[in-house]
Amino acid sequence: MLENKKIVLGVTGGIAAYKAAELIRALIKKGAQVKVIMTKSAKEFITPLTLQTLSQNQVYTDMFVPADKYEMAHITLAEFADAFVIAPATANIIGKIASGIGDDLLSTTIMAQEKPTLICPAMNDKMLANPIVQKNINKLKKFGYAVMESAEGELACKTKGKGRLPDVAEIVEAIETLLTPKDFAGVKILITAGPTEEPLDPVRFITNLSSGKRLI
Ligand SMILES: Cc1cc2nc3c(=O)[nH]c(=O)nc-3n(C[C@H](O)[C@H](O)[C@H](O)COP(=O)(O)O)c2cc1C
């Protein structure tokens, strides 16, 4: 399913950023091509060198590059990708996407593309429960982004609650779902248990034979 699929992975500055390494390995193992964009904060948690080595590709970190390396990465990455994934996604990147802010390479690239996009929020439970964060997550869903449910359990800040990055296997499965063609998208299906009956009076009705057509 992921063989030769091109995934652009955005990694943001959360404690779960180290799990991006595992995610890249899992995607590569499935035959995907992976290019990584890291935010400035993400580099505090894991090095670009690690993600570059695992993805076997240059890691993108800067919006503005020297003239000799001229590339408008926010445009070329948008063209390259079959899908975008942000894992882990901080409250900050979620808020920026929801507000149309493009102040670094990742937020600008996300704004400049229309590919299927999966957001995997990971943060402290109180941050996740914050009504503004929830409003932003709902806004992303309304605009067609796939947003994974954060997992429950022990958090890095020593509390227990909802906010963990889902397991890598679950993220990979969600990416596969994201890239699966939706054959029935937009198709309206009426499921009927039998023919239509139209009452004539309280005891009699007119009817017709069921067409017997199976829609699924
Ligand atoms: C040790 C530490 C852990 C953090 N973990 C998270 C986290 O898991 N989720 C989150 O949303 N923010 C977390 N933050 C805050 C973000 O790093 C901060 O909001 C940053 O501006 C995010 O930038 P970015 O979205 O551009 O990567 C953490 C900060 C520190 C210092």
Image: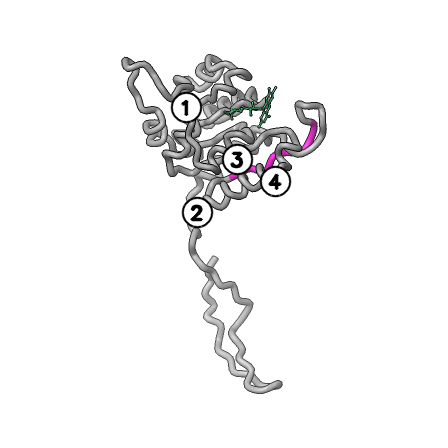
Task: Say whether marks 3 and 4 touch (CB < 8 Å).
Answer: no
Q: Quadrant of ligand 1?
A: top right
Categorize mark 2 by other alpha carbons within 10 Å: few (<14), some (14-19), many (20+): few
Q: Which residue is mark 3?
A: 173
- Of discs 4 and 1, which sits in the foreground? 4
Residue at the right extreme of this rendering: 159
Q: Secondary structure at mark 2?
A: loop
- The structure residue drawn at horizontal position 71% and vertical position 23%, both measured from the top left corner, is 158
Q: CA distance from mark 3 to mark 4?
A: 28 Å
- Of discs 2 and 4, which sits in the foreground? 4
Q: Secondary structure at mark 4?
A: helix
Query: Residue 16 shows which numbered tag?
Result: none
The answer to whether 168 appears left or right of 83 in the picture is: right
Point out the image quarter for the N terminus: top left
Q: CA distance from mark 2 to mark 1?
A: 25 Å
Against 23, residue 170 (above or below) is below
Can see residue 131? yes
Amino acid under disc 1? Lys
Who comes first in sequence, dot 2 or dot 1? 1
Q: Which residue is mark 1?
A: 35
Q: CA distance from mark 2 to mark 4?
A: 32 Å
